[in-house]
């Protein structure tokens, strides 16, 4: 029997930091030969193992958006009410009266397929952190889920694990899960989609950003300890599954909503003390991307001393610490004069607090461990010089328009109706949303089951209308029109409850971008989304891209999930979909 | 036949429950506790008397349902 | 009315509870940290809020029940002080021995959040004086472990002494139908022997506002406010 | 010192989780399963080497926290 020893010195055996960097090692890090050449050109020497790990984390699809970046640039992201567009932990809009709404959607597709409960749970945890790192208290979450054929042997297990994982995390954290989508199609048999969206509110003058300022300021680690969780998880999320992946499954993280709830309260309390200069959530590629981002955004260097990183396991190497994806952690740059106040807040909440480095003026990312410099890299280039691909793409061939005359009329309309309302796609989703606490915080004006959820802001009268939409089969048939339609549906769902649509977040789930047909779907969907957003003055303020959702060469249906946010000036005036009385007129609007 | 399956989290996996219990034991005055990990136990009642078959069956049950081997390990004990 | 809402690490309906108390009484509840060893002077009512104290790890409410502040809560209850435990608060009350029985995992094994009818079993207690006896109210449930169970003897005592506060029922007050969690005798809440401690799984604090689902929960807090008005 | 505590529901208490697992095992084709009961296991790491003291301590931990003796029984195993 093996039992973990929990108190142990953090001394690592010196695993060599400078092994020969073989092509195999490069490939294992998900880097292509030309990408490795780029590294050599950039630093003018062979990287150390830790450095190779850092590059693999920063330059994978997940972090660098290397296949999608140039296309994302085409999206409209501005409007007078947009405070922060894409590029921060989450997008921010102004809804008046000094109130800002912070929101984002993110996928946790691959981990949820491997370990549905924990994969989905940590997905919710990650997106909540994105929102409260910006200073906002989360007031609602939504989720868009896609599963395979209901009769596929794995589907039942996956849906039950994912739904209880989402509930398990959100319910314990204490945020209402007010809406979402559940869909089924055989093309998701081997690649389910778990997209989670979180929405928070704060004062417009109380928003926190990732940009570090000031030289010599302490960099502080907060939250749970670092373990060997998901080392290379970020790389995994960008690698297509193959048949053997059931066997060589990497570790997934276990979520701790309890720790996250403490982290929320401690972080918001800390922000009140005026000691936070910059803050960044440690998501995928944890310590690496959070530290690099804070430094690069502020035109500063960063030095980390890994001996001070709180660890859960013995003998963790620099490489492992830099790549760990342990959950419920954050990195902050603090005002040195207020460090003690900050530390007291964290101790009160029983969380780890450690100064793990400081900002410098040399624009280098330096990693020290046990008296050795394990990595020294140019900090801005780590992000700016990431590979950027304009991948070849082909347009999805237009399908012939079906002639209604050639479609046989159904014998019984009643049977058609029954088949429709009985289909998994359209049937009631009560089984799902009853497992989510959608009433906590006492502001849920419209519960799940309607067009969009309506959540009151504090004591009102203002409220938010929230929805998640996309119809993947439209996107498959005509990516441009499908992308447009998803945005339009979100818009309609918000207006249907009486909301004024303001902005969206998106979660673009596609197959392997190295295949021109898939890249074509991506490009065209994005154009459709952009066209609809421009036409409706409904900008994109945050989002996430999940590519390589493909098993054995078969991709998912193109699924650009749209999360829409609108405002209601008076929630008492929101409209619901039920008929209110007998004898009322029914009016059909539109064509 | 009776059998017991013990499923525990792999050592490298975070065990939030164990951590919370450890903290609580300490604050209840049990100072000498250096670590707690929580796991699950399944007590199975099986038909038949073929021990070897039972063992193979239980292993299959663990792989398919009782444990998620991504994060958990399991051990099977068959009674007498 | 002086009320104290206890904040355990992992509590998450403390704001909802404080809002309901404030709406009913006009005064702000004191928020008391779990590490405190005394309640604010003159506390009339202690409220143990819903949530997942300590992550609900081990057993729901088990770790919170053993935190320092609970000794003060026990002393308060022993002197006849009022204690209301909602959801996780109810679980903490049974784990701390202030109420009998246990709350097991819901019989269908899933967390359940929905609107739920309750029958108010009696209206001669401080908690329910503004309801009618037998009144059917609609509140919310949101829990994974609300399946109340007690041994036969305890159960008989609870029933004989009229200590069942609320039962799950349908809109017509019929308790025959299965409740949301498999509780024995459809028990949704129980009183202590002296009727000064009430534990209940449903959330009256989330039903105090016509805009947010209804106001059937408000009378509970108003009953308390009336009784403890200075 | 290492110790293991096994907490199981008393036989008189219904175990819906065990029942659900039994059902799933059956539907996965494991026909010979006549019953499943689920319990918890705690692996403790203790300072000190006094076995008798450890045993007494762990018993106290069970009574005070690890088990709810209204519905659960526990068993302590000390390694080596
Ligand atoms: N995963 C989910 N989580 C929470 N609520 C959901 C989820 N899936 C569906 N719902 C809710 O169920 C209702 C019906 O969903 P859906 O069939 O997608 O509606 P529509 O097509 O009208 O958007 C909506 O109110 C939606 O928010």
Image (cartoon, coloured by chain):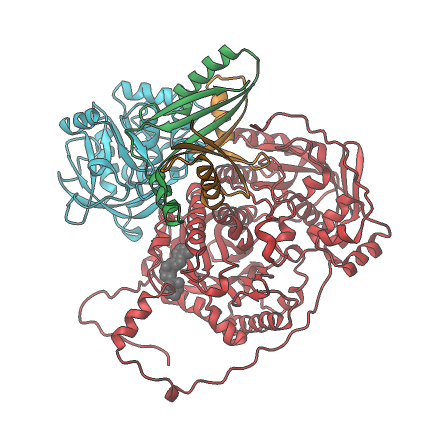
Chain colours: A red, B orange, C cyan, D green
**Residue A484 seen by the camera:** no
Residue A543 placement (x, y as % from top left): 56, 59
**Viewer-closest of A564 and A516:** A516
Residue A415 placement (x, y as % from top left): 27, 73
- Total numbered badges shown on the rendered structure: 0
Name which residue lies at 34% across and 50% down: A434
**Residue C164 seen by the camera:** yes
**Viewer-closest of D31 and A431:** D31
Residue A149 placement (x, y as % from top left): 43, 62
Where A219 sits versus A384, above or below? above
Residue A147 falls left or right of residue A519: left
Where A520 sits versus A460, above or below? below
**Ligand 1 quadrant assignment:** bottom left
Where B40 sits versus D48, above or below? below
Q: Quadrant of residue D50?
A: top right
**Viewer-closest of A311 and A383:** A311
Quarter of the image with the N terminus of chain D in it: top right
Q: Quadrant of residue C49?
A: top left
Residue A134 falls left or right of residue A413: right
Residue B5 falls left or right of residue A496: right
Quarter of the image with the C terminus of chain D in it: top right
Residue A335 placement (x, y as % from top left): 66, 37
Residue B65 falls left or right of residue A21: left
Q: Residue furthest right?
A: A44
Q: Residue furthest front?
A: B50
């Amino acid at each position: 029997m093996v039992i973990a020893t929990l108190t142990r010195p953090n001394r690592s055996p010196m695993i060599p930091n400078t092994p020969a960097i073989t092509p195999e090692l490069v490939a294992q890090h998900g880097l292509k030969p030309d990408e490795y050449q780029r590294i050599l050109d950039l630093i003018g020497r062979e990287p150390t193992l830790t450095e190779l790990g850092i590059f693999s984390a920063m330059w994978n699809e997940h972090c660098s958006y290397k296949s999608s970046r140039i296309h994302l640039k085409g999206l409209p992201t501005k409007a007078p009410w947009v405070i922060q567009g894409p590029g921060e932990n989450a997008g921010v809009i102004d809804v008046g009266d000094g109130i800002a709404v912070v929101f984002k959607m993110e996928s946790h597709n691959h981990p949820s397929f491997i370990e549905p409960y924990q994969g989905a749970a940590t997905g919710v945890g990650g997106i909540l952190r994105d929102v409260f790192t910006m200073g906002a208290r989360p007031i609602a979450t939504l989720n868009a889920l896609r599963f395979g054929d209901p009769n596929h042997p794995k589907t039942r297990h996956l849906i039950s694990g994912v739904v209880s994982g989402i509930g398990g995390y959100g319910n314990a954290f204490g945020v209402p899960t007010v809406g979402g989508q559940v869909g089924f199609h055989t093309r998701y048999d081997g690649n389910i989609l778990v997209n989670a969206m979180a929405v928070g509110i704060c004062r417009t003058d109380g928003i926190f950003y990732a940009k570090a300022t000031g030289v010599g300021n302490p960099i502080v680690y907060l939250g749970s300890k670092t373990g060997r969780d998901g080392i290379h998880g970020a790389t995994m999320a960008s690698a297509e599954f193959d048949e053997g992946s059931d066997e060589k499954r990497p570790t997934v993280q276990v979520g701790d909503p309890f720790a996250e709830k403490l982290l929320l309260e401690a972080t918001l309390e800390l922000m009140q003390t005026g000691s936070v200069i910059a803050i960044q959530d440690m998501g995928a590629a944890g310590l690496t991307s959070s530290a690099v981002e804070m430094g690069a955004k502020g035109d500063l260097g960063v030095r980390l001393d890994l001996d001070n990183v709180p660890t859960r396991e013995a003998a963790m190497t620099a490489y492992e610490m830099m790549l760990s994806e342990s959950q419920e952690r954050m990195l902050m740059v603090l005002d040195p004069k207020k460090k003690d106040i900050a530390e007291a807040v964290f101790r009160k909440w029983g969380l780890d607090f450690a100064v793990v480095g400081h900002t410098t003026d040399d624009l280098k990312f330096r990693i020290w461990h046990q008296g050795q410099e394990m990595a020294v890299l140019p900090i801005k280039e780590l992000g700016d010089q990431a590979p950027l691909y304009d991948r070849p793409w082909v347009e999805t061939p237009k399908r012939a328009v079906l002639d209604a005359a050639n479609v046989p009329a159904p014998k019984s309309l009643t049977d058609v109706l029954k088949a429709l309302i009985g289909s998994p796609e359209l049937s009631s989703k009560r089984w799902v949303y009853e497992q989510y606490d959608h009433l906590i915080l006492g502001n849920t004006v419209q519960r799940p089951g309607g067009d969009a959820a309506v959540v009151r802001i504090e004591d009102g009268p203002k409220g938010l209308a929230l929805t998640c939409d996309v119809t993947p089969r439209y996107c498959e048939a005509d990516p441009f029109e499908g992308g447009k339609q998803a945005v339009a549906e979100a818009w309609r769902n918000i207006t249907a409850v009486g909301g004024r649509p303001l902005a969206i977040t998106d979660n673009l789930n596609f197959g392997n971008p190295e295949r021109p047909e898939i890249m074509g779907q991506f490009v065209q969907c994005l154009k459709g989304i952009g066209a609809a957003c421009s036409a409706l003055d409904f900008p994109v303020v945050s989002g996430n891209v999940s590519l390589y959702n493909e098993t054995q060469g078969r991709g998912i249906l193109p699924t650009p999930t749209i999360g829409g946010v609108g405002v209601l000036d008076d929630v008492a005036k929101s409209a619901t979909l039920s008929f209110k009385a007998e004898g009322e007129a029914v009016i059909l609007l539109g064509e | 036949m009776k059998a017991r399956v013990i499923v525990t989290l792999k050592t490298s996996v975070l065990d939030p429950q164990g951590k919370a219990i450890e903290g609580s034991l300490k604050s209840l005055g049990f100072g000498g506790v250096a670590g707690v990990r929580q796991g699950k136990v399944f007590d199975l009642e099986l038909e038949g008397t073929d021990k070897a078959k039972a063992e193979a069956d239980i292993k299959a049950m663990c792989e398919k349902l009782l444990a998620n081997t991504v994060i958990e390990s399991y051990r099977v004990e068959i009674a007498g | 009315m002086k009320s104290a809402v206890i904040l355990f690490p992992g509590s998450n309906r403390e704001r909802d509870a404080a809002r309901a108390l404030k709406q009913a009484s006009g005064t702000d509840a004191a928020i008391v940290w779990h590490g405190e060893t005394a309640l604010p002077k003159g506390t009339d009512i202690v409220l143990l809020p819903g949530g997942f104290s300590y992550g609900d790890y081990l057993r729901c409410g088990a770790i919170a029940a053993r935190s320092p502040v609970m000794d003060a809560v026990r002393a308060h209850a022993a002197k006849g002080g009022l204690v209301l435990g909602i959801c996780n608060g109810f679980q903490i009350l049974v784990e701390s021995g202030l109420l009998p029985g246990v709350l097991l995992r819901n019989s269908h094994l899933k967390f359940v959040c929905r609107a739920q009818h309750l029958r108010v079993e009696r209206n001669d207690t401080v908690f329910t004086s503004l309801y009618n006896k037998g009144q059917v109210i609609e509140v919310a449930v949101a829990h994974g472990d609300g399946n109340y169970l007690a041994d036969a003897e305890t159960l008989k005592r609870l029933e004989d002494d009229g200590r069942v506060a609320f039962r799950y029922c349908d809109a017509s007050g019929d308790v025959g139908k299965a409740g949301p969690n498999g509780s024995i005798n459809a028990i949704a809440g129980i009183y202590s022997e002296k009727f000064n401690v009430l534990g209940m799984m449903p959330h009256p604090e989330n039903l105090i506002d016509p805009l947010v689902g209804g106001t059937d929960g408000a009378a509970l807090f108003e009953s308390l406010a009336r009784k403890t008005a200075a």
